[in-house]
Image (tube, rainbow, N blue to C red):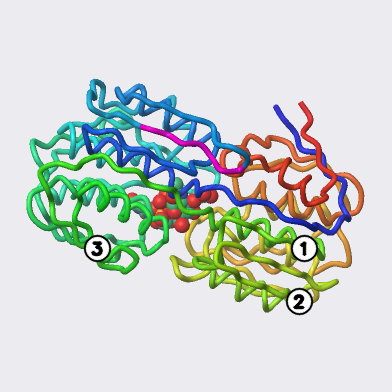
Amino acid sequence: MDKLQISGGVALRGEIAISGAKNAALPLLCAALLTREPVTFTHVPHLNDIGTMLRLLEQIGVKVAREAGKDAAGDTVTLDASALDNPLAPYELVKTMRAAILVLGPLVARAGEAKVSLPGGCAIGARPVDQHIKGLTAMGAEISVEHGYVHAQATRLKGARIFTDMVTVTGTENLMMAACLGTGETIIENAAREPEVVDLATCLNAMGARVSGAGSDVIRIQGVEALHGATHRVMPDRIETGTYLCAAAATGGDVRLTGTSSAYLDAVIDKLMDTGCEITSERDAIRLKAPARLNAVSIRTAPYPAFPTDMQAQFMAINAVADGTAVIRETIFENRFMHAVELIRLGADIKIDGNTAFVKGVAELQGATVMATDLRASASLVIAGLVAQGETVIERIYHLDRGYEALDQKLSALGARVARLK
Ligand code: EPZ
């Protein structure tokens, strides 16, 4: 079980490249199921979750070719789904990566059948998939949920008007992919507006789909007979970008991140500027210069373009050492404050009341041994460890490896004293 050892107190300085977005790459890889022709993706981040998804696709019958990229350019992955022979996503895989649910829509649309394990809950919440099922049922799929599996069948999905009860990112993505091969028009209302949804729609249209409205809360899809191959570059990871900006902010640093931009991070950039950081945006880079001490900033998470829930834990870490008291409201997931108790072990002053956290900035944090519980909570502990006096050891960092490519190398390149312990 790998651990990360950090000797805090160093201001991060320098330049690193941002990887392709995990939450764009995962649905994009599933889109390849929709066509018999090869689809190539570039700038695919080298992450454990990507490896898990590729293993799942291979089990379904997809031929996978993966070529490591130079430097931080990510991998080039070509998928050939011409012969699907096993439309099954088993529990053993799905329980380690909930995004496996994203094969459900494409498999029903392309193969007429899918058997996908219910993802079950995770550290941050119950994470049901009822909206995915509701939408596919509206499109005419026969769906049964038995023995922990969703079993869906359809000779051919038909266009439908779907109103999701809440904004769901992978729900929108699953239904958008399924509708591409249906008959007639599908309208998804209350659709997720996240940039990753737009990136997926761009790729689907390059494959011959007819998707419009992605990025708004109403997406229209005209079904077509078949899709063809394409080549698509995965968009930069806006959450990785935000995470390193927070690390630089907390440590009083000055960093430049390349291969990314502030384009999809307005809510986060605004809040970082409120803390007193100076942000310079370039066409495909972003620079942050931090003050000696940050002002506390309150946040409330909500669907895009509002403040992203995936940046909530990182902002709790920077508020732990800021001037003043911050109020953090988490409105998306019911249990996404697991990092708070670990931050308190490092000396943070945090009170939790339901889905609200009150964070009172302290003069300094002290290094300690802490435990990662989920991906973004782990990132929050890394940020706190970078700014704490003394040594912090973070256990169970497999959570980090799921979503942050070469994290220790990138932090070391910015001057952090960090080591991965076996
Ligand atoms: C995606 O998860 C992301 N994962 C998450 O990132 C992100 O936190 C989340 O969107 C919100 O932005 C990927 O894209 C792979 P939702 P997803 O469906 O799609 C409820 C990370 O750290 N809901 O938008 O699973 C759900 O319980 C991960 O990279 C239902 O009730 O999230 C939640 O409260 C964590 N029924 C809310 O909606 C459904 O059928 C939003 O969930 C679907 C969702």
Secondary structure at badge 3 equals strand
| Label annotation for residue 295 | 2
Residue 219, picture quadrant: bottom left
Give 327 or 169, whichever is nearer the viewer. Answer: 169
Based on the picture, tell me whether residue 73 belongs to the magenta stretch.
yes
Q: Is residue 239 left or right of residue 391?
A: left
Beta carbon at label 3 within 8 Å of ligand 1:
no
Q: Position of residue 186 (x, y in %)?
A: 15, 57
Q: Is residue 322 left or right of residue 34?
A: right
Give 148 or 107, whichever is nearer the viewer. Answer: 107
Total labels: the figure holds: 3
Residue 273, picture quadrant: bottom right
Q: Earlier in the sequence, mark 2 or mark 3?
A: 3
The residues colored magenta run 72-78
| Label annotation for residue 219 | 3
Beta carbon at label 1 within 8 Å of ligand 1:
no
Q: Position of residue 418 (x, y in %)?
A: 81, 42
Three-letter amino acid code of the residue under disc 2: Asn
- How many neighbours does mark 1 have within 10 angstroms: few (below 14), some (14-19), or many (20 or more)? many
155 shown above or below 314: above
- How many neighbours does mark 2 have within 10 angstroms: few (below 14), some (14-19), or many (20 or more)? many
Secondary structure at badge 1 equals helix
**Spatial distance from mark 2 to mark 1, Cα to Cα?**
11 Å
Q: Residue furthest front?
A: 70
Q: Position of residue 300 (x, y in %)?
A: 55, 71
33 shown above or below 414: above
| Label annotation for residue 250 | 1
Q: Earlier in the sequence, mark 2 or mark 1?
A: 1
Q: Are marks 1 and 3 in contact (CB under 8 Å)?
A: no
Residue positioned 12% across, 56% down in the render: 160
Three-letter amino acid code of the residue under disc 3: Ile
Residue positioned 60% across, 61% down in the render: 312
